[in-house]
Image (spheres, coloured by chain):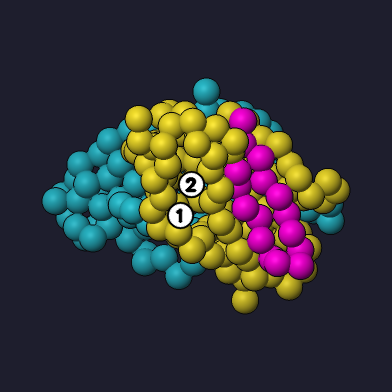
Chain colours: A yellow, B cyan
Amino acid sequence: AQSVTQPDIHITVSEGASLELRCNYSYGATPYLFWYVQSPGQGLQLLLKYFSGDTLVQGIKGFEAEFKRSQSSFNLRKPSVHWSDAAEYFCAVGQYNFNKFYFGSGTKLNVKP
Amino acid sequence: DTEVTQTPKHLVMGMTNKKSLKCEQHMGHRAMYWYKQKAKKPPELMFVYSYEKLSINESVPSRFSPECPNSSLLNLHLHALQPEDSALYLCASSQVGTAEGTGELFFGEGSRLTVL
């Protein structure tokens, strides 16, 4: 069965520090992977996606993620966090050839001044 | 700016009321979704429409009734809801999955529903 695990429920980093949010997936075929961000009371905004090709993908707002098939991971990174990055982050996997998406439980990011 | 528009943004209803949530997209997407999101939880899939036909119903209670009148519109009709149905209801759209893969979900800002 398909699943997505985000091991960290909360993460606090200082403004200007680097960030890595973890995501592990379980999926039998080629995964289609996504990272979304959600500010309180808002919808989800796509940060980046991986379908195929280069395993290091660049997204909006200075975020990047690396797909590692051997580790079944798709971790999100940012070299220098801004206070406006404080939000909830969701990793998701899309099922091949079928419109179904599975979301991880989310990681809440707090940014210290 | 989101390209998926949801109305109303906030809705308060009693358990005997009938109301509807509306969603509209003009990106030419032929797959549309309803998700339910409780506080501090990930979105939970409720329904998927593909080419205006219901393709996935995740065992949602019949007090939630989806409708897809055309390729741009998606409604969620609500009747006899319970207080535990209070949540953020998110609409999303995407390309229909093909052999080349599935496109990403585009979300609206959600409708915050409170059932008294």
Residue B92, picture quadrant: top right
Q: Distance between the residues labelled 2 and 1?
A: 5 Å
Q: Does A2 sit above or below residue B86? A: below
Asked if the residues shown at circle 2 and circle 1 are in contact, with their CB atoms under 8 angstroms apart, the answer is: yes
x, y percent for residue A67? 73, 54
Along the viewing direction, whichever of A14 and A38 lies nearer the viewer: A14
Residue A109, picture quadrant: top left
Label located before the other in sequence (2 or 1): 2
Q: Does B96 sit above or below residue A86? A: below
What residue is shown with label 2? A89
x, y percent for residue B6? 43, 34
Q: Is A53 covered by the magenta stretch?
A: no
Give amino acid for label 2.
Tyr
Residue at mark 2: chain:
A
- For the point 73% across and 42% down, which residue is it? A57
Tag 2 secondary structure: strand
Residue reaching furthest to the bottom: A1
- For the point 57% across and 64% down, which residue is it? A4
Instruction: Describe residue B66's horizontal placement relative to residue B32 as left or right.
Output: left
Res A110 seen here: yes
The magenta stretch spans which residues?
A: A62-77
Tag 1 secondary structure: loop
Residue at mark 1: chain:
A
Give the overall secondary structure of the magenta segment. strand
- For the point 83% across and 46% down, which residue is it? A54
Instruction: Report the disc number at residue B78.
Output: none
Along the viewing direction, whichever of A75 and A3 lies nearer the viewer: A75
Q: The C terminus of chain A appears in which quarter of the rendering?
A: top left
Q: Is A73 covered by the magenta stretch?
A: yes
What residue is shown with label 1? A106
